Each structure stands twice: as C-alpha cells, then as structure tokens.
Image (cartoon, rainbow, N blue to C red):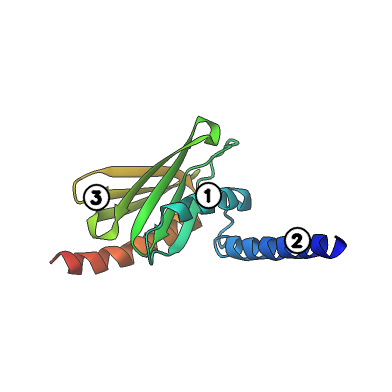
Amino acid sequence: MRIGLLKRLGNRLIMMENEIEEIKKYLNEDQDPKVIKKMLPKIKNLLTSNEIIEYIAVQKKPVVTLSPDCVALTNKRVIFISPKSFGLTMDFKDFQWKNVKDCHVSEGLMGSTFSTLSVLNNKVVVSYLPKNQARILYRFTQEREEEMSEYRR
C-alpha cells in the first residue's frame, strides 16, 4: 500500500517538474508565470501537427487584470488570446503567417501596442504589452513577414 502511494507521489513530482520546466521556456521577459501556466494548455490544444510555440507575450495593464490578453507566436501562425467573462471563456483569433500583411508595434508610457494586419485587411490589436515583450514579438514577426513576402511572390 505504501509503496503504491510513494510511486504515485513520485510520478506526480516528476509531472510537476516537467510542467515547471515547460513553463520556464516562456518566462524570458517577466511574463506572469500564473498566466503562462493557465494559457499554455489552452494554446497547445489549438496547435496543428508539427506546430511549435515559439513565444508568448502577456499583457500587463496598469491596473490588476485577472485574465490578461496574450499573443502566442508559433512556427505556423500568430494567435491572439482574449479571456472573456473573468477568464471563464476565451476568444481566439489567429492568422497563418502566409496571410499576415503587416505587424506593427508602437511604444507608449504605459507599455506597447502590437497589431497584426492580414492580407484581407483584418486587424487585431493588443495593448499594454511590456515593451521588451513587444519588441521580441516585432522582431519575430518581421522575420516571418520577410519569409512570407518571398512566399507570396
């Protein structure tokens, strides 16, 4: 009986360590660990085969936000996650990289705004991103935009 319990506890600890290691990959620029822990499984459920999460940026408003917006970049698309109803529901919008026409970052006093415009002129905007996270989003998206402009030629 005790051996079985110890095995289960050991397995649980290993699972927790693996989860912590996975979350650490996305905590490069002071992202809120609680938000990453909550959003990561939801984002993973949206991934297609061979799709890999490259980066996650987390909104940081000047007031307390229970469920901040996030932007996830994968090797195949950009995904915008907007929690609604105090985090009980989620709104997901995405653009495949081949459909991204332009990405823009503007920096202000209270953070940065990141926007993406599709080739069909659909636009999604996330405000109050920490500046360092927005710069990384911008750098990554500029690389993808260059690749896709070659692809569309």
| Residue 36, visible in the rendered structure | yes
Figure quadrant of the C terminus: bottom left
- Earlier sequence position, callout 3 versus callout 2: 2
Left or right of residue 77: residue 98? left
Neighbours of disc 1 within 10 Å: few (<14), some (14-19), many (20+): some
Residue displayed at 25% across by 69% down: 147
Residue displayed at 29% across by 56% down: 96
For residue 118, the mark is 3
Dot 1: what SS? helix
Q: Position of residue 1 (x, y in %)?
A: 85, 60
Mark 3, mark 2: which one is toward the viewer?
2
Q: CA distance from mark 3 to mark 1?
A: 24 Å
- Residue that badge 1 annotates: 39
Of residues 59 and 34, the one nearer the viewer is: 34
- Residue that badge 2 annotates: 8
Mark 3, mark 1: which one is toward the viewer?
1
Q: Position of residue 71 (x, y in %)?
A: 43, 51
Dot 3: what SS? strand
| Residue kind at label 2, given as amino acid type | Arg
Q: Is residue 38 above or below residue 89?
A: below
Q: CA distance from mark 2 to mark 1?
A: 26 Å
